Amino acid sequence: MHESLPPYPQQPPQPLPGGVRHYRPRRALWDTLWDNKAVRAGGLILLLALCGLIILALVREQTGTEGFLVGLGLAVLPVPLLIAAFRWMDRVEPKPWRNLAFAFAWGSCAATLVAILANGFATKWLMNTIDVTDRARAAGWGATFVAPVVEESAKAAAVLLLFTFRRRDFNGLLDGVVFAGITATGFAFTENILYLGNAFASDQSFGHEGLPSTTAATFFVRVLMSPFAHPLFTSMTGVGFGIAASLAPRRRVLRAVVPVLGLLTAMTLHGIWNGSASLPGLGFLAVYGLFMVPVFGVLTWLTIWSRQNELRTLRTHLPAYQAAGWLTWPEPLALSSMRARGIARDTARRQGGAPAARVVAEYISFATSLAFLRQRAYRGLGLEDFGVREQELLHHLWVRRDVAQPALAVAAGVGAGVGVPAAGAVPPGAYGAPGAAPWAWPGAHGAGWPPG
């Protein structure tokens, strides 16, 4: 495992050789569109766009143009709030926009198309095979037993694709929840257009309007009361993939079983939720208040704990680079505090404008990636090109240090309320300073590790 890690490289770094770069500053959408990666992703974009056009035609056919527009206007309301919530969870190591855009597009286009076609086929099959007197139950059975399997499997496909092809951006439980939640937000968005559009069309046919209308009731239940329903279900799948991402490659059976258990949990929650709609009296409210809300609370606590754990990863692994001379004394403290990060960016913006703030943000991003890279190597995950990636990240830090390090020193003092030495100074006897005690890596078996 960690015994095979190479020693920490000495600074200053050597110039990077030509070739592929694994880490780059986060770039704006319109800048990235000119990059070759966008060209290589053209096939996927066309596929999702085709699914979106088919979905648009199907929904418009069912709801009519006016119903579609009303459904669209109402369904979009919770989307910014949900995406903002998942982005807030992901603030420690923000995922690339292209991964999140893919997740949302897959949920709103591909997964929804699969669900509409498969659910429709299953409902027709039930209607044609069940006794005539029981056909009224076919829709309920389909919603309770068929829809959860189809829809959660379709949404899970996006998480599986990201887990497989964007493995470097998939580090743990929180990443799984974010990817799954964004996918489910896209799915719920399209589904809400369909439900709200159909409700509006029904109200138009029967002359209903205002609060007693079907549209108002549907909006209350799906948009106001339970906007988190689909993200909650699919997040169980994300938890499974997130746990698998943190396991060593040698634990192959567990890495395969845990995502399946997460998917089964998502299907179960989805089935309970759908089935509660057919319960008599206050059954639906009982399931909502006594089951769904507590599960949502537990997931919220788990994601907050995971985010704090990510900050602990920085506090654990960055001091080693400070001790080796790559980082100044205040930086591990500032980089492991969300408040201090914000202060550092604001400080740089006041002194050097938006370009300086962007440099600090890039420095924070690369330092975070460095800590997570070291953590993965410590756990025995992805050691093949560890040295190359580490050198590249350290190079990116080195060329930005003159702008970022003073701002982080200020942030460490203001944000944490501690005294900060002069830039570049290391207190006598500090961890890793000249004359300090030998290495004592947290979690290692005694001192003397890592080598070098």
Image (tube, rainbow, N blue to C red):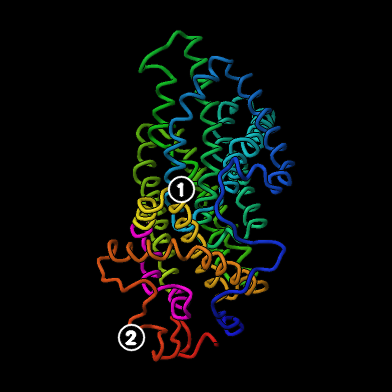
- Residue 426 in the image: state x and y as whole percent: 36, 79
- Residue 420 in the image: state x and y as whole percent: 30, 71
Q: Which residue is mark 2?
A: 428
Identify the mark at residue 380; answer none if there is no mark. Answer: none
Q: Which residue is mark 1?
A: 87
Horizontally, residue 195 falls left or right of residue 423, namely: right
Give, as a three-letter code, the residue at label 1: Arg
Q: Which span of residues is magenta-colored?
A: 317-341
Q: Toward the viewer: 167 or 395?
A: 395
Query: Dividing the picture into quarters, in which one does residue 451 lie?
Result: bottom right
Magenta span includes 319: yes
Q: Residues within 10 Å of mark 2 (few under 14, many from 20)?
A: few
Note whether 165 is above or below 183 in the view shown. below
Which residue occupies 39% across, 89% down? 436
Label 1, label 2: how far apart the Cα atoms are: 40 Å
Give, as a three-letter code, the residue at label 2: Pro
Q: Secondary structure at mark 2?
A: loop
